[in-house]
Amino acid sequence: MEESAGDHEEITPELLMVMSASIAAYLGRSVRIRKARFVDPMQVNAWGQSSRVVLQASHNLNIRHT
């Protein structure tokens, strides 16, 4: 049975090690993770949707009629 990210209730030490190694590989130096938590997927979608609306609304569409 596969587990999805929503099924986890705690962040394990193994997961923190993987996160730390990934960040260190990206930055090129060692890092210390001070705090980690799971994010509610519904909030992430709301923020993403809001950002997309603002970005799309900021585009100036010039329509030429000939």
Image (spheres, helix red, strand yellow):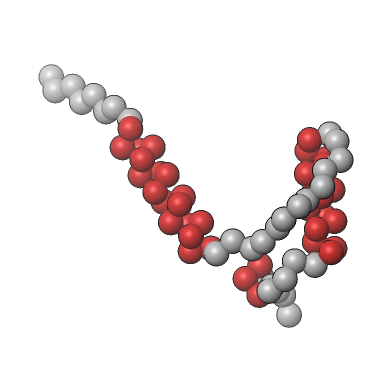
**Numbered disc total:** 0
Residue lying at the far left in this picture: please name it: 66
- Residue 6 is left or right of residue 25, and the answer is left
**Residue 57 vertical placement versus 5 (above, below):** above
* Figure quadrant of the N terminus: bottom right
**Residue at left 82%, top 55%?**
18
**Residue 14 vertical placement versus 33 (above, below):** below
**Residue 31 vertical placement versus 9 (above, below):** above
Residue lying at the far front in this picture: please name it: 34
- Residue 30 is left or right of residue 50, and the answer is right
Which is more toward the observer, 66 or 18? Answer: 18
Q: Give percent across and percent down for residue 30.
A: 86, 40
Q: Give percent across and percent down for residue 64.
A: 18, 22
**Residue at left 48%, top 64%?**
42
Residue lying at the far bottom in this picture: please name it: 1
- Residue 9 is left or right of residue 46, and the answer is right
* Figure quadrant of the C terminus: top left
**Residue at left 42%, top 44%?**
51
**Residue 60 vertical placement versus 17 (above, below):** above
Which is more toward the observer, 3 or 51? Answer: 51
Which is more toward the observer, 3 or 33? Answer: 33
**Residue at left 85%, top 56%?**
17
